[in-house]
């Protein structure tokens, strides 16, 4: 004899299946939401890491070129920076190209991408021949502004 007359020996009632299905869907949606949030956070942290690395590499490259430079010149539209080294007879030029900051050695004729995520670069002449370089790095929703003050050595 069956103790529960509403339950058939062949399976569950329609109400039990509806409740179980609803609970399973709610649980599945919650797991999917947590996983989606995790993936968005990982993507943001990854973009932030790339932006920070590109900004620091750009600053190091600029500082390395500045150590050997004798003078700096900024174009009239403030989009190009020329650093000249009279000892090595080399002029290094920095300029913005699409979403990259490009370093060009004019005498050797080759370009090097100094930073890939640089969405803008502005170079301003300051007093005493110094230059303020302002960069904006962005990838996805992660961004960083970098101001580099280049104090170009002057002959006294």
Image (cartoon, rainbow, N blue to C red):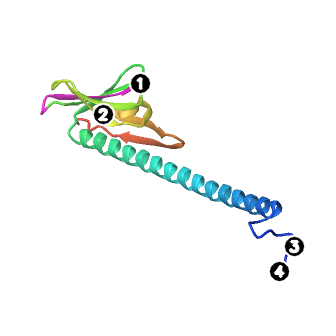
Instruction: Report which residue position mark 4 lands on.
Output: 1
Instruction: Verify whether residue 94 appears in magenta.
Output: yes
Q: Choose the circle earlier in sequence order: 2 or 3.
A: 3
Q: Choose the circle earlier in sequence order: 2 or 4.
A: 4
Instruction: Report which residue position mark 3 lands on.
Output: 5
Q: Calculate the distance from the C-alpha at mark 4 to the C-alpha at mark 1.
A: 92 Å
Q: In the drawing, what numbered circle is on residue 78?
A: 1
Q: Is residue 25 left or right of residue 34?
A: right
* Callout 4 secondary element: loop
- Start-end of magenta stretch: 87-97
155 and 67: which is toward the camera? 67
- Quarter of the picture containing the N terminus is bottom right
- Quarter of the picture containing the C terminus is top left
Which residue is most to the top?
Answer: 76
For label 3, the crowd category at 10 Å Cα-Cα, with few meaning under 14, some 14 to 19 and many 20 or more, is few
For label 2, the crowd category at 10 Å Cα-Cα, with few meaning under 14, some 14 to 19 and many 20 or more, is some
């Amino acid at each position: 004899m069956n103790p529960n007359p509403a339950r058939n020996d062949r399976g569950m009632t329609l109400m039990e299946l509806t409740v179980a299905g609803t609970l399973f869907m709610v649980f599945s949606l919650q797991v999917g939401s947590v996983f989606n949030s995790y993936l968005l956070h990982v993507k943001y942290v990854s973009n932030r890491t790339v932006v920070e690395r590109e900004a620091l590499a750009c600053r190091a490259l600029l500082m390395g070129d500045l150590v050997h430079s004798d003078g700096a010149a900024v174009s009239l539209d403030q989009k190009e920076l020329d650093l000249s080294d009279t000892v090595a007879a080399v002029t290094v030029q920095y300029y913005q190209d699409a979403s990259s900051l490009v370093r060009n050695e004019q005498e050797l004729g080759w370009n090097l991408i100094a930073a890939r995520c640089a969405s803008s670069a502005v170079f301003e002449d300051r007093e005493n021949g110094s230059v303020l370089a302002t960069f904006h790095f962005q990838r996805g929703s992660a961004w960083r502004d970098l101001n580099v003050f280049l104090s170009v050595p002057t002959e006294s």
